[in-house]
Amino acid sequence: MISILAQERLLGAALGSVFAGAVIFEQRRDIYKTIAQNQPAKSQMKEHIHSKKIEFAHYWNKSVDRIFGPAIQALSSRRW
């Protein structure tokens, strides 16, 4: 059988571990909650990125049309 002193030490270590785990869990939960409140929602970020991609594609197409437009007109006038 285990001595009373060893039992008390084991009980103290177990209760201390549970208490420390609960404190750490609460702190992490509070940290994640404040981060979530300060950041925009992911759907808003996705919409913003999607609109930036569309805007980039629009400018890309306009620049390609300006650069290769005369070449395409020249080739089409030659019946290529």
Image (cartoon, rainbow, N blue to C red):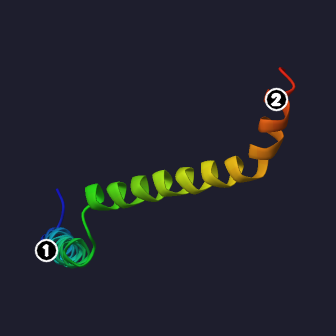
For marks 1 and 2, the one nearer the N-term is: 1
Residue at the farthest front position: 77
- Residue drawn 22% across the image and 71% down it: 36
Which numbered mark, 1 or 2, is in the foreground of this view? 2
Q: Which residue is mark 2?
A: 77
The part of the image, by quadrant, that contains residue 44 is bottom left
Above or below, 79 relative to 54: above
Q: Nearer the viewer, residue 24 or 18?
A: 24
| Distance from Cα at disc 1 to Cα at disc 2 | 96 Å
- Where residue 29 sits: x, y (%)? 18, 71
Residue bearing mark 1? 8
In the image, 21 versus 1, the foreground residue is 21
Q: At 24% across and 63% down in the image, what residue appears?
A: 41
Q: Quadrant of the N terminus?
A: bottom left
Pick out the residue farthest to the right. Answer: 78
In x, y percent, where is residue 12?
A: 16, 75
Displayed quadrant of residue 21: bottom left
Badge 2 marks a residue whose secondary structure is helix
Rendered image quadrant of residue 28 = bottom left
- Does residue 30 appear to the left or right of 64 in the view shown? left
Q: Is residue 62 above or below residue 28?
A: above
Left/right placement of residue 46 relative to residue 64 reads: left
Q: The residue under label 1 is which amino acid type?
A: Glu
